[in-house]
Image (cartoon, rainbow, N blue to C red):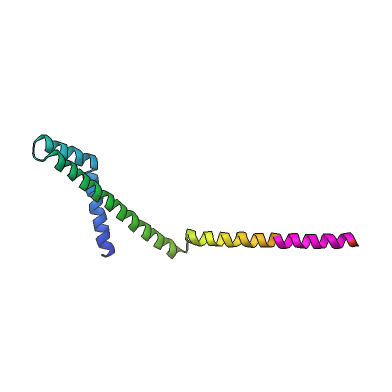
């Protein structure tokens, strides 16, 4: 599926979601039950199916957006969180090592100063 197809599907879903929110679907199904056109069980099943499809479309759209935003950030040269966290851990380790070296030098130089 190409980007244009995804955008069209997203637009269709957005328009459909705006026109038929879950609440509207529930109202519609309740009216159908009241008129005797469908059973209560069929109405419940219909609402569940519409809700499930809407949730799936929402997840799909969120994944698509996340992938494309991540791609744009990579193109812009932004670092990913995992990479930044790795670098922070390395810096922390280097800071710890430097502190150990400094404390080792201070002990050695303090001992030399007291001998003089």
| Residue at left offset 73%, top offset 61% | 102
Q: Is the magenta stretch mostly helix, strand or loop?
A: helix
Whether residue 47 sits left or right of residue 93 in the image: it is: left
Residue 72: x %, y % from top left: 40, 62
Q: Nearer the viewer, residue 18 or 58?
A: 58
Residue 54: x %, y % from top left: 25, 49
Whether residue 30 sits left or right of residue 92 in the image: it is: left
Q: In this view, does 94 lie above or below 32?
A: below
Q: In this view, does 90 lie above or below 29?
A: below
Whether residue 59 sits left or right of residue 107 in the image: it is: left
Which image quarter holds the N terminus? bottom left
Residue 42: x %, y % from top left: 14, 43
Number of labels in the image equals: 0
Q: Quadrant of residue 40?
A: top left
Residue 4: x %, y % from top left: 26, 62
Residue placed furthest toward the top: 34
| Residue at left offset 62%, top offset 61% | 93
Q: Which of 100 and 60 is in front in this view?
A: 100
14 in magenta: no
Which stretch appears magenta? Answer: 100-114
Residue placed furthest toward the left: 36
Which image quarter holds the C terminus? bottom right
């Amino acid at each position: 599926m190409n980007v244009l197809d995804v955008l069209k599907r997203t637009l269709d879903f957005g328009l459909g979601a705006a026109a038929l929110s879950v609440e509207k679907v529930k109202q519609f199904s309740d009216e159908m039950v009241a008129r005797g056109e469908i059973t209560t069980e069929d109405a419940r099943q219909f609402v569940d199916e519409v809700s499930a499809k809407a949730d799936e479309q929402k997840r799909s759209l969120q994944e698509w957006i996340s992938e494309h935003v991540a791609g744009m950030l990579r193109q812009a040269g932004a670092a990913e969180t995992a990479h930044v966290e790795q670098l922070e851990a390395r810096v922390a380790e280097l800071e710890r090592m430097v502190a150990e070296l400094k404390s080792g030098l201070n002990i050695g130089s303090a001992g030399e100063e007291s001998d003089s």
